[in-house]
Amino acid sequence: MLTKIDLLNHTFKSPILVASGTFGYGDEVAGLIDVNQLGGIITKSVTLDPREGNAPPRIAETSAGMLNSIGLANLGVKEYCQTKLPQLNKLETKVIINIAGYEVDDYVKTLQILEDHAGNHAGYEINISCPNVKSGGMQFGVDAVLTESLTSEMRKHTKKLLILKLSPNVTKIEDIAMAAEAGGADMISAINTVVGMGINIHKRKPVLNTVFGGLSGPAIKPIALANVHKIYKVVSVPIIGIGGIATAEDVIEFIMAGADLVQVGTANFKDPSIGLKITKGLEPLCKTLEVANIHDLKGTLEYY
Amino acid sequence: MVNEVATVISNYEIASNYWQAILKAPEISRQAKPGQFINILPIKSWSKMMRRPMSIASNEHGNISIIYKVIGEGTQYISDWKEGSKVDIIGPLGNTWPEFKDEYPILIGGGVGIAPILYLQDKFSSEGLKHHLIMGAKTGSEHFLEHSPDEGLLLTTDDGTIGVKGTVISALEAIFHTPSDIRNYRICACGPSPMLNAIKLFASDHSIECFVALETMMACGFGICQGCSIEREQNSDIGSSYREKYSLACIDGPVFQTNEIKNC
């Protein structure tokens, strides 16, 4: 298998995972695609308590992307364990649960509740980078000291994969990545959305209720690639590349820049089966690039 | 819900900047009910990332239709669809209009909001259920139906060029001022927000049941993106809850009873 990836005692069917918030809990798309053909699914951010999310409007289209300010709307971890975990346990693909919070205690309690429920999930992706909620974990995401202490606190409570999802909205992402690694993170996901804004000139209003939101989609791919490459140069843990991926070529770019796996996000809204289409496109590309396994391309970028 | 590659049967302007596209989509046609919508991919290029949700305006013999105005780039692409083009659509999505027992239906469409109203009217006509239909537009050239008050079909125009001069509320008032034995009216409406809010108020003042199909920005169309929030009326801020304060237009709607929601 050209696209199978063995990483940290886990076998991923392909390097293609679907990003948190763009694939729900895997059941919504049941009639459209076979989720088990994906490398993995990162479920929608779950918080300790249920959350209504932000007032509308929450989304807007941009050139080659979209702005969102959902505000972590979700059913809360208790309901998640009762209604979502049992069906996620039946999936054959890797399930990674995205957790968001406000303070260390929220993150840890949410993690503990999930650990107490026998789940088959491979691990957790810790969202310290949501730009759309006041202190939606973002105070961790921009501070290396807080990132390290949160990571090491979470590390104490789980043996499953611990993945820190980083924000591009920082001065130096390398510092945050190194802090996550020092705190005991197994992997780093990068990037979350880029802070953006749009204006409806006829209404003289921002396109989002919260004024600022998170930009995603192909528009941010160059930003994501740059951040992944910067992180690759300073950490030794595996990296999951995220940001505007829509084609098999995009995936190879991220892997050459230093990613081990990738997540497809906004493109899922346009085409729920894009993850599987990209996976199919990877095999011929691996042959063209003359590698026995796609993982052999990691970090093979050659400078001028 | 299926992701179907539909074939364009026809796509033309039926009134001034009102377009109707008929799509051969057997599976969606088989599953669809009045009130439901489809999420359309206007263009494959990644330069446009969002689908366009549109109500189903008719459904017969494996063909469904949409009615739209060319407003921006997305609808411009849709208006360029040629006969025989293949288009990627997901549907049917969302809930349906309520079941009618002995209620008397007043159907109201404003602008392209007429789409889900026409589909419902088709159902009533085939069942022989008597009803009124009001369609509002700015001016006569935007109308594609015939003003026929005797058959319960009232057109309105802001400038009075066709039908009742004024808004759909003017026609609604005319119906209510006509002596009648009917007591249990029920309104089903779709159109621009100001129109729906005026109808919501009218219904509440006259103690009439009222349902509206709402249009919002939407990415996925089936509950994943959480982008299409609608603020609910029973907003008893209980601190932490999910979908108590905000419903999602895609899976909780698009049809809502007006007393359930704060604004249309």
Image (tube, coloured by chain):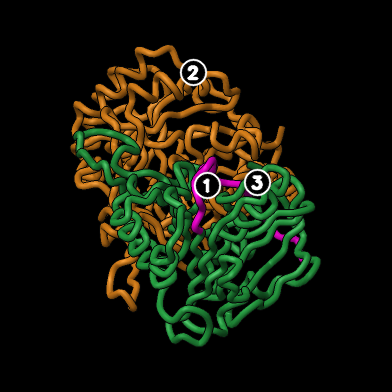
Chain colours: A orange, B green
Mark-to-mark CA distance, 2 and 3: 30 Å
Q: Which percent across, then down, holds residue A251?
A: 58, 49
Is there a contact, CB below 8 Å, between mark 3 and mark 1?
Answer: no
At label 2, the amino acid type is Pro
At label 3, the amino acid type is Ala
At 34% from the left and 34% from the top, the residue drawn is: A126
Query: Quarter of the image holding residue B199?
Result: bottom left
Callouts 3 and 1 in the same chain: yes
At 49% from the left and 46% from the top, the residue drawn is: B103
Callouts 1 and 2 in the same chain: no
At 67% from the left and 58% from the top, the residue drawn is: B58
User: Which of B70/B224 is in front?
Assistant: B70
Within-10-Å neighbours for mark 3: few <14, some 14–19, many 20+: many
Q: Quick check: B161 left or right of A55? A: right
Mark-to-mark CA distance, 1 and 2: 33 Å
Chain under label 2?
A
Within-10-Å neighbours for mark 1: few <14, some 14–19, many 20+: many
**Label 2 SS:** helix
Quadrant assignment for the N terminus of chain B:
top right
Q: Which residue is mark 1?
A: B97
Magenta-drawn stretch contains B87: yes
Q: Which residue is mark 3?
A: B32
Residue stretch in magenta = B85-106
User: Which of A250/A132 is in front?
Assistant: A132
Q: Is residue A276 above or below residue B46?
A: above
Q: Quick check: A212 left or right of A64? A: left
Quadrant assignment for the C terminus of chain B:
bottom left
Q: Which residue is mark 2?
A: A86
Query: Quarter of the image holding residue B74?
Result: bottom right
Mark-to-mark CA distance, 3 and 1: 12 Å
At label 1, the amino acid type is Trp
